[in-house]
């Protein structure tokens, strides 16, 4: 087994047989024993997957100052492929086996999530469809999940006058269960690599190449602009990339200029950077003005990252069975993006924005007529992507039961409870 951070390209290819896993020897092993596989060849190896966690709908705020998705330990499973076997192919020169461009077959293949037919009812809906991503969906999803960062660090290997290295990076990190969604994003941008962390419970789509950032990532967000205050980070990020392209970062003056821009991005400079650049002067952070949501594809993308499909069963004296069922769709954001939530409420023509805590607001839709006539049809036409689509499907199933009046009987309530118990972080997947 490979240790440390790994990067795999997994795709069901035509006429695939046994599962193949690329085995790439480490540099130290090569130095000791020499090259033990020909470059460009594929070495087959049977592989089994272990227990996995789940990335579902958003949890509540972890702290008053941040919005964080609950992610449970786990790893990628061929459960996502309807128990199909995977063939993983070594791409290009083996020391660069991170994926550069995913096969065009990804958009031609219908990936699905399903358990064995006999146990399908125990694990939720049968399918998660993965389709070609719309550009506005990608921008909406990136508002929720992407990050633009610039690292400024000392490189002792450099014997030059400055000795500092500036590395811009675009990254989207998700639970490993959403590896297919990361592959979709990589296919869309046609660049970058997929990296799995040591725990294998989280995967990341990363673009670090200056060429790829300049020619693929930045042009996309220029043509399909980000909403929310993340757009300010992108604007500053783009300035730094442009400066690096002109080699300004190789001079003391240029490096200081980049430091001043970096000081206004995200959480600002680190303590080490502040101590090294004591004369830093943060540039004014751009003021982002937006007046409307572009379209429903953006809504679907943003909701795939930040949306939450909930079912609430509570006691009540309003009916004979003493229980009521409420479906809730909500999106939570930091208070600085309250305006964004208000625009979403206006665009979807339902729900309202409420104060969630001192530093957070939530857009919530709880009226069944709005859920049935607006929320569900929107995401039926503009699909939620990733594992969260399972929560949406369960959400729809319960809505159907409520529409049929099944929630007014003890048997119906029990059935709804069973569906609720498999949603979000409670969803269980069979062991492989």
Image: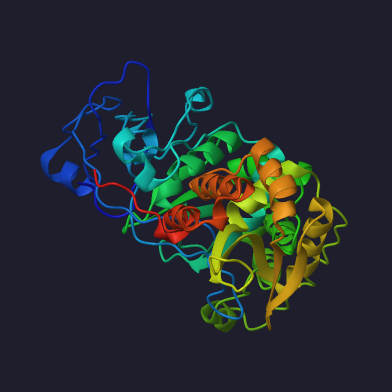
Tell me: 143 left or right of 283: left
Query: What is the x, y in percent for residue 228?
Result: 74, 61
Q: Is residue 170 visible?
A: no
Tell me: 16 left or right of 331: left
Q: Residue at x 29, y 55 (%)?
A: 4
Q: Residue furthest right?
A: 291
Q: Is residue 12 visible?
A: yes
Query: What is the x, y in percent for residue 43?
Result: 21, 29
The answer to which of 138 and 129 lies nearer the viewer is: 129
Tell me: 175 left or right of 143: left
How did the renderer colour the structure? rainbow
Q: Residue furthest left?
A: 33
Q: Residue at x 56, y 55 (%)?
A: 407
Q: How many marks?
A: 0
The answer to which of 2 and 396 lies nearer the viewer is: 396
| Location of residue 149 (image quadrant) | bottom right
Tell me: 16 left or right of 414: left
Query: What is the x, y in percent for residue 264?
Result: 70, 72
Q: Residue at x 43, y 62 (%)?
A: 71
The answer to which of 82 and 367 lies nearer the viewer is: 367
Q: Residue furthest front?
A: 320
- Picture quarter with the C terminus: top left
- Above-or-below relation of 101 to 15: below
Query: What is the x, y in percent for residue 105?
Result: 48, 23
- Above-or-below relation of 11 to 136: above
């Amino acid at each position: 087994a490979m240790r440390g951070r790994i990067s795999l390209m997994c795709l069901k290819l035509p006429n695939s047989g046994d599962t193949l896993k690329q085995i790439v020897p480490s540099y130290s092993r090569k130095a000791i024993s020499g090259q033990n596989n020909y470059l460009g060849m594929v070495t087959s190896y049977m592989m089994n997957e272990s227990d996995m966690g789940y990335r579902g709908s958003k949890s509540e705020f972890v702290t008053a100052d941040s919005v964080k998705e609950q992610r449970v330990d786990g790893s990628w499973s061929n459960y996502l492929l309807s128990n199909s076997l995977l063939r993983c192919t070594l791409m290009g020169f083996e020391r660069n086996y991170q994926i550069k461009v995913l096969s065009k077959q990804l958009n031609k293949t219908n990936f699905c999530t399903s358990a064995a037919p006999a146990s399908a009812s125990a694990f939720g809906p049968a399918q998660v469809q993965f389709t070609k991503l719309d550009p506005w969906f990608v921008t909406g999803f990136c508002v929720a999940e992407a990050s633009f960062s610039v690292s400024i660090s000392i490189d002792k290997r450099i014997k030059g006058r400055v000795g500092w290295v500036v590395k811009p990076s675009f990254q989207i990190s998700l639970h490993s269960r959403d590896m297919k969604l990361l592959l979709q994003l990589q296919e869309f941008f046609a660049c970058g690599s997929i990296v799995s962390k040591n725990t294998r419970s989280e995967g990341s789509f990363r673009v670090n190449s200056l060429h790829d950032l300049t020619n693929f990532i930045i042009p996309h967000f220029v043509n399909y602009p980000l909403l929310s205050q993340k757009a300010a980070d992108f604007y500053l990020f783009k300035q730094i990339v442009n400066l690096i392209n002109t080699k300004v970062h190789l001079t003391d003056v240029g490096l200081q200029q980049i430091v001043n821009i970096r000081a206004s991005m995200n959480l600002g400079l680190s303590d080490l950077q502040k101590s090294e650049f004591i004369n830093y002067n943060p540039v004014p952070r751009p003021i982002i003005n937006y007046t409307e949501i572009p379209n429903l594809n953006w809504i679907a993308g943003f909701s795939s990252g930040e949306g939450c499909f909930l079912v609430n069963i509570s006691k009540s004296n309003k009916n004979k069975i003493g229980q009521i069922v409420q479906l809730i769709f909500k999106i939570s954001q930091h208070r600085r993006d309250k305006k964004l939530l208000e625009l979403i409420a206006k665009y979807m023509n339902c729900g309202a924005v409420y104060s969630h805590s001192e530093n957070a607001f939530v857009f919530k839709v709880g009226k069944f007529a709005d859920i049935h006539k607006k929320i569900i049809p929107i995401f039926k036409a503009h699909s939620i992507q990733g594992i969260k689509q399972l929560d949406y499907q369960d959400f729809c199933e319960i809505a159907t039961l409520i529409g049929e009046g099944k929630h007014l009987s003890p048997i119906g309530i029990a059935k709804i409870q069973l569906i609720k118990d498999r949603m979000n972080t409670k969803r269980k997947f069979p062991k492989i």
